[in-house]
Amino acid sequence: MSSEPITVTEQSVRAALVGYPHRVEDRPDLRPASVTITLTGSADTANSVLITRRAPKLRAHSGQWALPGGRCDDGETVVEAALRELAEELGIQLDESAVLGRLDDYPTRSGYLMSPVVLWAGDVGQRGPRPLRPRRAEVAAVYGIPLEQLDVEPNLLSIPESDAPVIQIPLMGRFLHAPTAAVLYQFREVVLHGRATSVAHFEQPVFAWR
């Protein structure tokens, strides 16, 4: 992990993503969904990515760490779904001018085709121009993870259920698993290091297959 704070700009992230040809999967067997990698920060604060802990009473993946997002409604684009889900889950209202780019589609074991959309939210917080208002029915907690905490090498594990390696990212004294770990690892590689790194081959832990 980097010892010094990592800062980026809206322009530098957009340039990194413009230069990366994200992969779009043709998987009609999977339900389309969007997740957001939402960057916060201002001239006076360091950059962070917003991560949530899902509410304990949700029907699926309760209590797990996640990026804001959810399934696309009928007729909705990936970007439209990302902006809507961010507003519904965290109360952050952004428009398409906040979209910096996309990363690779990631098929999940639970039946979704996850499309990551990178957004610039700027100054977010209880006293900022965009206050956080988490929807408690869906979000138990929300965290701003500094970029230097994401700049880590992942753990790769073997499991008997799959030939593919399971990816984990050490974070906040525990481990973040795929699919969220895979998406954030690709963000780290493409945006922070300028490396065109695929993550489609990374597996998810068995508990995330349902």
Image (tube, helix red, strand yellow):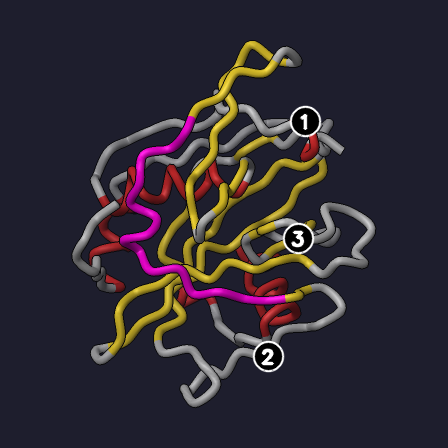
For the point 72% across and 64% down, which residue is it? Answer: 138
- Between 138 and 130, the residue placed more toward the observer is 138
SS of the residue under disc 2: loop
Label ID, residue 133 = 2
- Mark 3 highlights which residue? 70
Q: Residue furthest left?
A: 4
Label 1 or label 2, whichever comes before in sequence order: 2
In the figure, residue 129 lies in which quadrant?
A: bottom left
At 47% from the left and 34% from the top, the residue drawn is: 168
- 31 in relation to 34, above or below: above
Residues marked 3 and 2 touching at CB (< 8 Å): no
Distance of mark 1 from mark 3, alpha carbons? 20 Å
Q: Which residues are magenta?
A: 141-155
What is the crowding at mark 1: few (fewer than 14 residues within 10 Å), some, or many (at least 20)? Answer: few
Q: Name the kind of residue labelled 1 in the image.
A: Val
**Residue at point 36%, 78% (across, down):** 123
